[in-house]
Image (cartoon, rainbow, N blue to C red):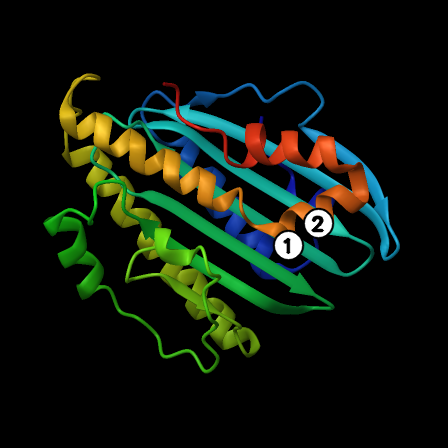
Amino acid sequence: MDVDAAAICTHPLVLSLAQILQTHWRKLEQCKPLALPRGMEQVKGALDDGPVQIRNCCFSARGFRKMHLELATIGPGLNILHAVMFPDPCWDLPLFGCDLVAARGQVSAAVVDLSPTAGTLSPSLNQQLQALPRPEFSEPRQLPPWGDIFSAAVCFIRPRGVEEEQAFQQLAVGYLRLLLAEAGRINPDSPDHPATVARKAAQLRYCRQQQCNDKTRRVLAKAFGEPWADDYIRHVLFDEPDS
């Protein structure tokens, strides 16, 4: 089931990217809804800043074990979009990740990347990334200490104004379309192929590094309690590939 972004979010960039992602996912071969843990599709809590609402949807498709979109609001003004496409480790594909944080009508953080799961991105994908028009953003941001899981092409910025927000969206959609084109071009390896095993290990590391995001954990723990926050991070946001 899709997430109705307009039901909880108000920022135009969050609404637009949520719609774009779900539209592209729905068109993928063998796309089907993926069940979430019980009670995780819609979650409500509270912080000092106001009520907390979270909506989640997940899909799987040919080449992707999980495609997850999370939308969240805190109080009247904070909108969050979090999206990750986890490839099936049999496929030589990177992870697509995109996050937005918008407060009081302004986007304070926007990040998009194709994070490698095979040491480096494939030569063909890397070449296409290099050829993709990349805007000059006025305020790049520093990656967190665990940010070595990202590629050299990661874009992490604070967009200034609508023009930079639109430029970021174009870049994110460009990354998404490159990934989907690559998924349609290649064939999978066998589950026991050494490359599959290596990609599974890389994806496991990606998930465990993301689980180290203390800022996310603190916010969730304050609203829902530490056990719930830990379970949500490990089994909804960054669940590890099957062993």
Image quarter of the N terminus: top right
Q: Is residue 77 left or right of residue 100?
A: right
Q: In the rendering, at what x and y percent does residue 179 appear?
A: 28, 44
Q: Confirm or deny contact between disc 2 and disc 1 (CB under 8 A).
A: yes
Looking at numbered disc 1 in the image, what kind of residue is underneath it?
Answer: Lys
Kind of element beneath mark 2: helix
Q: Vertical placement of 231 versus 22: above or below?
A: above
Q: Which residue is mark 1?
A: 215
Q: Which residue is mark 2?
A: 218
Neighbour class for label 1 at 10 Å: few (<14), some, many (≥20)?
few
- Image quadrant assignment for residue 127: bottom left
> 188 above or below 237?
above
Q: Residue at x 49, y 45 (%)?
A: 210
- Residue 225 or residue 83, whichever sits in front: 225
Q: Which residue is depicted at the point 22% across and 17% down?
A: 191
In this picture, residue 137 sits left or right of residue 159: left
Category of crowding for the residue at label 2, using alpha-carbon neighbours closer than 10 angstroms: few (below 14), some (14–19), many (at least 20): some
Q: Position of residue 24 (x, y in %)?
A: 40, 39
> For this view, does 200 lie left or right of residue 130?
right
Question: Percent x, y for residue 204?
Answer: 38, 33
Viewer-closest of 60 and 193: 193
Residue at the image point whose x is 25% and y is 33% from the top: 199
- Seen at 16% across and 18% down, the residue is 190
Q: Is residue 156 above or below residue 232?
A: below
Residue at the farthest bottom position: 138
In space, the residues marked 2 and 1 are separated at their CA atoms by 5 Å
Q: Is residue 51 left or right of residue 35?
A: right
Of helix, strand and loop, which one carries label 1? helix
Residue 69: x and y in percent read 54, 39
Question: What residue type is disc 2 on?
Answer: Arg
